[in-house]
Image (cartoon, rainbow, N blue to C red):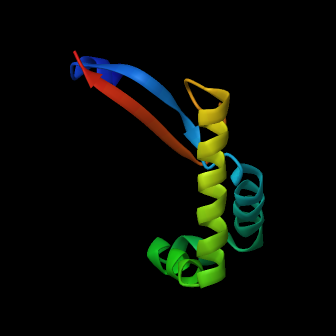
Amino acid sequence: MEKAFDAGFSVERCGFFNSFLFIPISVIRLASRLKDRREILERPKHQRLEQVSTVPWINGLLSRMFVSESHLVNKLRLRDYFRWGISLMAVLVKR
């Protein structure tokens, strides 16, 4: 937030999204690290993502989860989304 302010922006909204996936992804990441740290560090990140992102039913499920979270945030009129999540977002306004 400080870097945004120093660059001449004010923060209108800030928070996390992908909140529904926070616990499952955290568990998977922790288990993967415990399983074989060396193998995970040596394998390029894009290979791991490509293995999952090409399965159509997974893409459909993830899409529905993102839309559901967005509708929930809008229905509850949350200003800053959730306090936890996998991804961080901010809406900045030039001062």
Q: Residue at x 42, y 33 (%)?
A: 90
Task: Using residue 10 as the reference point, say whether residue 8 is left or right of it.
Answer: left
Which residue, as the protein is rendered here, is positioned at the far front? 75
Vertical order, 16 against 33 (above or below): above
Q: Position of residue 45 (x, y in %)?
A: 48, 71
Residue 85 visible to the viewer: no
What residue is drawn where x is 65% and y is 80%?
57
The foreground one among 11 and 65 is 65
Q: Nearer the viewer, residue 76 or 16?
A: 76
Q: Is residue 1 above or below residue 88?
A: above
Q: Position of residue 16 (x, y in %)?
A: 57, 38
Residue 60: image quadrant is bottom right
Q: Is 87 left or right of 68, judged from the image as shown?
A: left
Residue situated in front as seen by the camera: 56 or 23? 56
Q: Is residue 42 above or below residue 10?
A: below
- Quadrant where the image shows the N terminus: top left
Q: How many marks?
A: 0
> Looking at the figure, which quarter contains the C terminus?
top left
Locate residue 58: give its quadrant.
bottom right
Q: As rendered, which of 58 and 39 lies closer to the eye?
A: 58
Question: Which picture quadrant has residue 51?
Answer: bottom right
Q: Which residue corresponds to the image point at 21% horizontal and 19% vertical from the top-left?
A: 8
Q: In the rendering, at what x and y percent does residue 91 appear? A: 38, 31
Percent across and percent down for residue 26 are 72, 54
Residue 78 located left or right of residue 34: left
In the rendered image, the vertical position of residue 89 relative to residue 2, given as above or below: below
> Residue drawn 65% across and 34% down?
75
- Residue 27 in view here: yes
